[in-house]
Image (cartoon, rainbow, N blue to C red):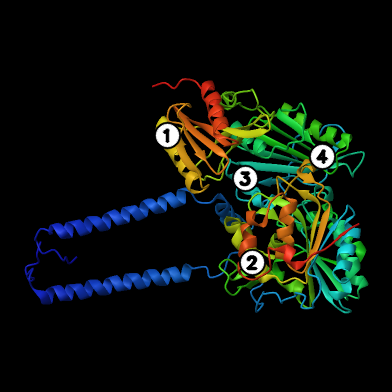
C-alpha cells in the first residue's frame, strides 16, 4: 500500500493537531457512551416492543394462571397477562416509567371473580421488581393517604377498593371493581395465597436506612423510597424521604446512601447547585448544624443539605431557616459516626 | 520508507497519490452514504395503511358566535352536561340534522367506571343521546387504548352504554391508521393517525375525565387526543408536553367536555383506588380545549402554569389559558 510518509519527523504543530483530533474522537466516543448509558427506558421499551410486534410475538395471553391453586370461591375471569420491561407500557401507558426507573423485571396480572357473584371482580397485578427495595420504592411512591392496615404482607394497606402490599421483591396491587367487603376479602385471600406459596429474600439495608429517620414528628406511613428524579433533580436517585409535622409546619427529611463519601460529597454540591440555580435559592453555610451543612432559602421554603460519610442527608421545604437547621440537626444526630 | 522512484519532495508523485487517496475516500463516503440510505427507515415502525393520501383531520371547530365555555357544578353527570350545553346555546348550536358525529372518549384502561380513569359511560351515553336528538345521522364512539380495546370498552362500561344509546362503537384496527405529517410539527411527522373512521365525519366531540398524570402533570381534554395516535406512541412520553401541543394543533374539535365530577388527584393516569379521587363536582363544556384544561388544572389544585403544554398551545394561538376572559357561563344543578 502506498504511503504519504516522507521519512521526516512530524513537526510539533502536526503532533499537536493529530493529538487534538484523537482527543476529540475520544471525547465523542465518551459522550456517545455516556448518552447510551443513560438512554431513556421508555424509548428502549418502545423500540423493543416494536421489534416484538414485528416478529409476531405477543405480550399477552400466557396460558398459566396467576397462582397455581385458586382460593375457594374464586375463579379466573380471563387469561393471565404477562408484561416485560419491553411491554409494560402496553398495560399502564403513562405510568410505566415509574416502574422501569425502579428496576422493574416483570408483571403478571389477571382478573378474578367470585364464583358466586360475577359482578364482584378484581384485578390482581404482581410486579416483580427484582429487589425488595425496588418493590418498596414503587409501593411507597404511590401510597395513598387515606388507608387502613390490611395485615397482609409487608406494609399491606387497604384504600377504598384497593389493596397494596410488598412481599420481598414483589409489589402487589389488587384493584376491585367496587369497595364491598366480600370483594375485598376475596382479594385479600388471593394475596395471602400468593404470599404463602412464594418464598422471598429480605433486604437488610432497607430496614436499616428507614430506621435512621427520627420518629418524633414523623407523619405515620410517610416513608418513601424514590428511585429517580428526587425533588425534580435528575442526578438524585435511590433516596428515602419521610414527612414531618411540627405545629402547623411540614417538612421532608431525606437520606440517600451513596457508593462512597466522595460520591456523597459530589452529589451534595450538585444538589445545592440545583436548589440555587433551578429553584432560585440563595445559599448560606449553616453555622450551628453539622459541619459543612448548607441551607438554601428558596423564597420562603428552606432546604438543607449535609454529608455524613457515604450518606447524603437533609431537609426539603422547611418553613423557616431555624426549622431547617433543627431538622437536619435531629436527622444528623441519628446517623452512625462515619468511619474515617 | 520512501519508495525508490518517489522523492519526498516530488510534488507530482504526491499529487498523484493525493488524487488516488482522495478518490478512495470519496468512494468510501459514497458507499457508506448509499448503505445508510438503503437502511434508513423513512417511516416510523408500525403496521398502518400507507395507501391513504393524508391522515390529517379536518377542522371541526365551531365558527358560530356564542358562549365559548360553560362551567356547571353538581353530582349528576347527565344533568350537568345537559345544563352546560343549554348554557352554550343548546346542542343544536353545534349538531345539525344529518351531521355524522365522532365522540372521542378516554377508554385507555380496562378499569371500572367508579375509578374515573376513563370517560364515564353515563356521560358518553348522554352525549350520544343529545347528538341523535339534535338530528345527527350517526354517532361513532372511539379511542385507541393500547391494551386490548375490547376489554377496555367493556370493563369501563363505555361500550355497552353508548351502544344502548344508539351509537356505533369503533374498535380501532391497524388498517384504519394512516401516516400523517402535521405542518410545523416536530413529533407528528409521518406518524400513524386514526384516520379511516373519520371519513364522512362532520363534527368531533372530545370527552375526558380530570386526572393527575405521572408524566404530563395532568391528563384532560388536550391529552385525550393522544388516543388518536397509533404506532410506538409511548416514546412521546419523553416529550409529553411537546406531543400534547402538537395534538392540539392536529385536532380542532367542535367542542370538548371535561368531567371533573370526581377528579383523580394522585397516582394518575391509571389510578386504581377510590382514595385517589376527590369529589370536585364540576363539569366543563368548551369550544376551547386549552381554556377547559386551564380551568381543569384548578380542580387538581394546580394552575395552568404547572402544565407547560398549556403555555405551549397558547403561544401557538390554539386557545387561551385565561379561561375567565371567555366569560364562562356558570350554573349549578
Q: Can you identify the residue that label 2 sits on?
A: B314
Between discs 4 and 1, the one toward the N terminus: 4
In the rendered image, which quarter is residue A301 located in? top right
Give x and y (percent) for residue A215.
Answer: 63, 23
The disc, 3 or 1, on the residue closer to the chain's N-terminal end is: 3
Question: Which residue in the structure is indicated by mark 4?
Answer: A161
Depth check, front residue: A88 or A138: A138
Q: SS of the residue at dot 2?
A: helix
Q: Mark 1 points at which residue?
A: A265
x, y percent for residue A161? 82, 39
According to the image, label 3 marks what residue? A98
In the image, A19 versus B10, the foreground residue is: A19
Q: How far apart are marks 3 and 1 (CA)?
A: 27 Å
Asked if marks 3 and 2 fall on the same chain, the answer is no
Residues under numbered marks 2 and 1 in contact, where contact means CB atoms less than 8 Å apart: no
Spatial separation of the CA atoms under disc 3 and disc 2: 29 Å
Q: Do labels 4 and 3 share a chain?
A: yes
Q: Position of residue A180 (x, y in %)?
A: 88, 37
Of the two numbered discs 3 and 1 in the rendering, the one whose residue sits closer to the viewer: 1
Q: Closer to the observer: label 4 or label 1?
A: 1
Mark number for residue B245? none
Figure quadrant of the C terminus of chain A: top left
Secondary structure type for disc 4 = loop
Q: Are marks 3 and 1 on the same chain?
A: yes
Label 1 chain ID = A
Going 91% across and 64% down the picture, which residue do you hit? B165
What's the CA distance linking mark 4 and mark 1?
44 Å
Label 4 vs label 3: CA separation?
22 Å
> A103 and B256: which one is in front?
B256
Q: Are marks 3 and 1 in contact (CB under 8 Å)?
A: no
| Picture coordinates of residue B244, whole percent (x, y) | 64, 62
Amino acid at each position: 500500500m502506498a504511503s504519504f510518509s516522507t521519512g521526516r519527523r512530524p513537526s510539533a504543530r502536526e503532533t499537536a493537531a493529530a493529538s487534538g483530533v484523537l482527543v476529540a474522537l475520544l471525547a465523542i466516543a465518551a459522550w456517545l457512551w455516556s448518552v447510551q448509558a443513560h438512554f431513556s427506558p421508555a424509548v428502549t421499551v418502545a423500540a423493543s416492543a416494536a421489534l416484538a410486534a414485528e416478529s409476531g410475538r405477543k405480550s399477552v395471553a400466557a396460558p398459566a394462571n396467576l397462582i397455581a391453586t385458586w382460593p375457594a370461591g374464586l375463579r379466573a375471569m380471563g387469561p393471565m397477562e404477562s408484561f416485560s420491561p419491553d411491554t409494560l407500557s402496553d398495560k399502564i401507558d403513562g405510568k410505566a416509567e415509574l416502574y422501569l426507573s425502579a428496576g422493574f423485571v416483570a408483571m403478571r396480572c389477571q382478573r378474578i371473580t367470585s364464583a358466586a357473584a360475577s359482578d364482584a371482580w378484581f384485578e390482581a397485578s404482581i410486579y416483580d421488581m427484582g429487589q425488595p427495595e425496588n418493590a418498596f420504592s414503587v409501593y411507597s411512591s404511590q401510597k395513598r393517604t387515606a388507608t387502613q392496615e390490611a395485615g397482609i404482607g409487608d406494609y399491606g394497606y387497604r384504600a377504598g377498593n384497593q389493596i397494596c402490599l410488598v412481599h420481598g421483591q414483589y409489589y402487589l396491587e389488587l384493584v376491585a371493581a367496587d369497595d364491598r367487603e366480600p370483594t375485598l376479602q376475596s382479594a385479600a385471600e388471593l394475596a395471602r395465597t400468593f404470599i404463602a406459596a412464594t418464598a422471598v429474600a429480605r433486604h437488610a439495608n432497607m430496614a436499616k436506612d428507614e430506621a435512621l429517620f427520627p420518629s418524633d414528628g414523623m407523619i405515620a406511613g410517610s416513608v418513601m423510597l424514590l428511585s429517580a428524579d428526587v425533588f425534580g433533580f435528575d442526578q438524585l436517585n435511590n433516596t428515602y424521604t419521610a414527612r414531618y409535622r411540627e405545629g402547623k409546619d411540614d417538612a421532608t427529611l431525606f437520606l440517600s446512601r451513596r457508593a462512597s463519601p466522595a460520591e456523597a460529597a459530589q452529589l451534595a454540591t450538585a444538589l445545592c447547585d440545583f436548589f440555587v440555580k433551578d429553584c432560585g435559592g440563595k445559599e448560606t453555610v449553616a453555622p450551628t448544624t453539622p459541619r459543612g451543612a448548607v441551607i438554601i432559602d428558596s423564597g420562603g421554603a428552606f432546604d438543607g443539605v449535609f454529608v455524613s460519610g457515604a450518606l447524603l442527608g437533609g431537609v426539603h421545604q422547611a418553613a423557616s431557616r431555624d426549622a431547617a437547621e433543627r431538622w437536619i440537626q435531629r436527622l444528623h444526630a441519628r446517623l452512625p459516626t462515619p468511619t474515617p | 520508507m520512501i519508495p525508490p522512484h518517489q522523492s519526498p519532495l516530488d510534488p507530482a508523485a504526491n499529487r498523484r497519490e493525493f488524487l488516488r487517496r482522495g478518490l478512495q475516500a470519496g468512494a468510501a463516503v459514497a458507499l457508506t452514504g448509499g448503505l445508510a440510505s438503503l437502511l434508513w427507515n423513512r417511516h416510523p415502525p408500525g403496521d398502518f395503511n400507507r395507501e391513504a393520501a393524508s391522515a390529517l383531520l379536518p377542522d371541526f371547530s365551531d365558527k358560530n358566535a356564542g358562549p365559548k365555555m360553560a362551567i356547571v357544578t353538581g353530582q349528576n353527570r347527565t344533568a350537568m352536561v345537559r345544563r352546560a350545553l343549554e348554557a352554550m346555546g343548546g346542542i343544536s348550536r353545534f349538531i345539525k340534522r344529518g351531521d355524522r358525529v365522532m365522540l372521542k372518549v378516554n377508554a385507555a384502561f380496562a378499569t371500572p367506571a367508579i375509578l374515573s380513569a376513563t370517560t364515564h359511560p353515563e356521560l358518553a351515553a348522554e352525549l350520544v343521546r343529545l347528538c341523535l336528538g339534535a338530528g345527527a345521522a350517526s354517532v361513532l364512539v372511539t379511542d385507541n387504548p393500547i391494551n386490548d380495546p375490547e376489554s377496555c370498552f367493556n370493563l369501563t362500561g363505555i361500550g355497552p352504554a353508548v351502544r344502548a344509546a344508539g351509537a356505533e362503537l369503533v374498535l380501532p384496527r391497524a388498517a384504519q391508521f394512516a401516516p400523517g405529517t402535521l405542518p410545523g410539527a416536530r413529533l407528528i411527522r409521518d406518524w400513524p393517525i386514526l384516520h379511516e373512521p373519520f371519513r364522512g365525519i362532520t363534527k368531533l366531540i372530545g370527552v375526558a375525565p380530570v386526572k393527575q398524570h405521572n408524566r404530563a402533570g395532568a391528563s384532560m381534554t388536550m391529552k385525550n387526543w393522544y388516543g388518536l395516535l397509533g404506532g410506538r406512541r409511548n416514546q412521546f412520553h419523553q416529550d409529553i408536553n411537546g406531543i400534547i401541543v402538537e395534538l392540539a394543533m392536529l385536532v380542532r374539535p367542535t367542542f370538548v367536555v371535561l368531567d371533573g365530577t370526581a377528579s383523580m388527584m394522585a397516582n394518575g393516569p391509571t389510578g386504581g383506588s377510590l382514595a385517589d379521587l376527590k369529589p370536585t363536582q364540576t363539569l366543563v363544556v368548551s369550544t376551547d380545549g386549552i381554556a377547559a384544561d386551564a380551568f381543569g388544572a384548578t380542580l387538581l389544585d394546580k394552575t395552568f402554569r404547572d402544565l407547560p403544554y398549556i403555555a405551549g398551545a397558547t403561544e401557538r394561538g390554539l386557545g387561551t389559558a385565561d379561561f375567565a376572559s371567555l366569560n364562562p357561563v356558570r350554573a349549578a344543578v
